[in-house]
Every structure is written in structure tokens, then in C-alpha cells.
């Protein structure tokens, strides 16, 4: 059994069930169109080493591009800021291993579905009442924590992108002053990143990094 063969079992035993819930997609990538500005994403990913898959739940927003600069209809969980690994117990990393036994592989697909129903839906429900919980996050929350967790449980690894998201949310709900504060936090983070990256001779990669820093500041700026 390899990833391509496992994908066929997903198409047969998983895809019809998730489509009944209003999701679209095929293969290892699925999405549910945005409701109240938030769209849901689900993905299955083959291991780099082969022999297994892991799964990710994620969300994104209809009022901004994702971290790869894509709109919701083109993105996958891989470039989403807010995501969580799926597991049968609801926490921790987990891989479903392939087997030479077809019945066991079908059981793995069914286990993915059971985990999606039990734990994946909890993840999506935590963000179903936009602008909550984002409107409850204050600039001081980001300033006072280097590893801020949304709702106390969802760690966001990119603090600059989180500041940008919160800037956009506050602009959307009309909180201009707080949007500016998140803008400032994000720009401070970009400047610190620039200090670490922009060192040495001004090579081609130096110039590319310079443009990246400039674009990040432009994205974070509130006019």
C-alpha cells in the first residue's frame, strides 16, 4: 500500500461522507466554503518517509489571502495560519500507518473519519461564531507572550502573520485603533526579523530578503 493507493480508499470511504456535510474536494484536500467569513479546510498528507499519513484541520478567511497569497478557493491547510493536527485522542501528533492488509487500511480510513467527526468538528466549532474569538484578543496578549495560544489551546507559530490577521479582523469590525496597535506589533516583528536576516554582503538573496521585508511592512501598514 502506498499513498496513491490509500488515496483511492479515501475517495471510496471518506470523500462521500464529508461531501454529505457540504464539503468539496477530492484526493487528500477538502474545503467547506466560508460562512460568516470563515471557511474550513481539511487535508491528508503522506509522510515524507512513506508508509503513513497524517491529517490536518485548518481554517481561513474570505477577507484576506493566505500565507501563500492565495484565495480560499485555491488554498490548502498547508498555507493556513490556524491549523491543528488530527488524532484519534484529540491531541498530539498521529500517523495512520499503511498495511498490506486491505481490511486494515479501510479501518484506518474509517478511523480518520471517526476522528474528524469527534475532534475535527470541535476545532471548527471553536471558530464558528466569528468575530469570536479574535475580537477578544488584545494587543497586550501578543506583547506579553512569545507563544500565544488562541482560546488557550491553538498555538500559532507565526506571530507576525497573527498580528496581521488580528489587524484585518479589527479593521473589518470597525475597531481602527486596535487594528493600528496590531499593525505596530507586526511591523516591530518584521523589523526584528530584518535585523537578523539582512546581514553581510548585498547579494541576490540579500535583495530578495529586502523586498520580502518591505512587502511584509506594506501588508501590515494601516493607512
Image (tube, rainbow, N blue to C red):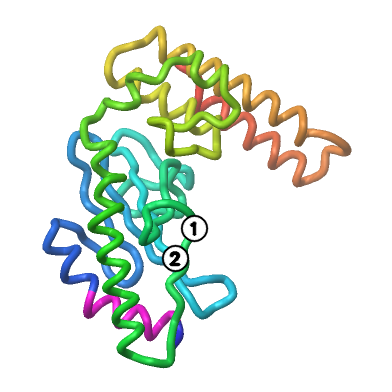
Which residue is outermost to the left?
20
**Disc sitting over residue 93 in the figure:** 1
Where in the figure is residue 92, as x and y percent of width and height? 47, 54
Q: Secondary structure at mark 2?
A: strand
Where in the figure is residue 44, as x and y percent of width and height? 39, 66
Which residue is outermost to the right?
201
Where in the figure is residue 195, as x and y percent of width and height? 76, 27
Looking at this view, is 10 or 118 the one in front? 118
Q: Nearer the viewer, mark 1 or mark 2?
A: 1
Q: Is 7 inside the magenta-drawn segment?
A: yes
Q: Start and end of the magenta stretch?
A: 3-13
The CA span between labels 1 and 2 is: 8 Å
Q: Is residue 76 visible?
A: no
**In terms of image quadrants, where is residue 62?**
top left
Looking at this view, is 197 or 158 the one in front? 158
> Which of the image's four quarters has the N terminus?
bottom left
Q: Is residue 7 visible?
A: yes
In the rendered image, which residue does mark 2 sit on? 54
Amino acid at each position: 500500500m502506498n499513498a496513491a493507493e490509500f488515496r483511492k480508499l479515501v475517495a471510496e470511504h471518506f470523500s462521500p461522507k464529508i461531501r454529505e456535510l457540504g464539503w468539496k474536494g477530492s484526493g487528500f484536500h477538502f474545503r467547506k466554503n466560508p460562512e460568516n467569513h470563515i471557511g474550513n479546510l481539511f487535508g491528508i498528507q503522506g509522510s515524507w518517509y512513506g508508509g503513513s499519513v497524517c491529517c490536518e484541520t485548518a481554517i481561513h478567511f474570505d477577507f484576506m489571502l493566505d500565507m501563500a497569497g492565495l484565495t480560499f478557493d485555491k488554498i490548502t491547510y498547508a498555507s493556513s495560519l490556524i491549523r491543528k493536527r488530527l488524532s484519534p485522542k484529540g491531541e498530539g501528533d498521529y500517523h495512520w500507518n499503511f498495511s498490506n492488509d486491505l481490511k486494515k487500511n479501510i479501518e484506518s480510513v474509517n478511523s480518520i473519519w471517526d476522528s474528524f467527526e469527534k475532534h475535527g468538528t470541535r476545532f471548527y466549532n471553536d471558530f464558528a461564531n466569528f468575530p469570536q474569538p479574535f475580537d477578544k484578543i488584545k494587543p497586550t496578549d501578543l506583547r506579553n507572550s512569545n507563544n500565544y495560544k488562541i482560546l488557550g489551546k491553538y498555538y500559532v507559530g507565526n506571530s507576525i502573520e497573527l498580528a496581521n490577521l488580528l489587524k484585518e479582523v479589527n479593521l473589518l469590525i470597525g475597531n481602527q485603533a486596535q487594528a493600528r496597535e496590531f499593525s505596530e506589533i507586526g511591523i516591530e516583528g518584521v523589523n526584528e526579523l530584518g535585523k537578523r536576516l539582512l546581514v553581510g554582503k548585498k547579494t541576490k538573496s540579500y535583495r530578495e530578503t529586502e523586498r520580502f521585508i518591505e512587502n511584509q511592512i506594506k501588508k501590515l501598514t494601516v493607512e
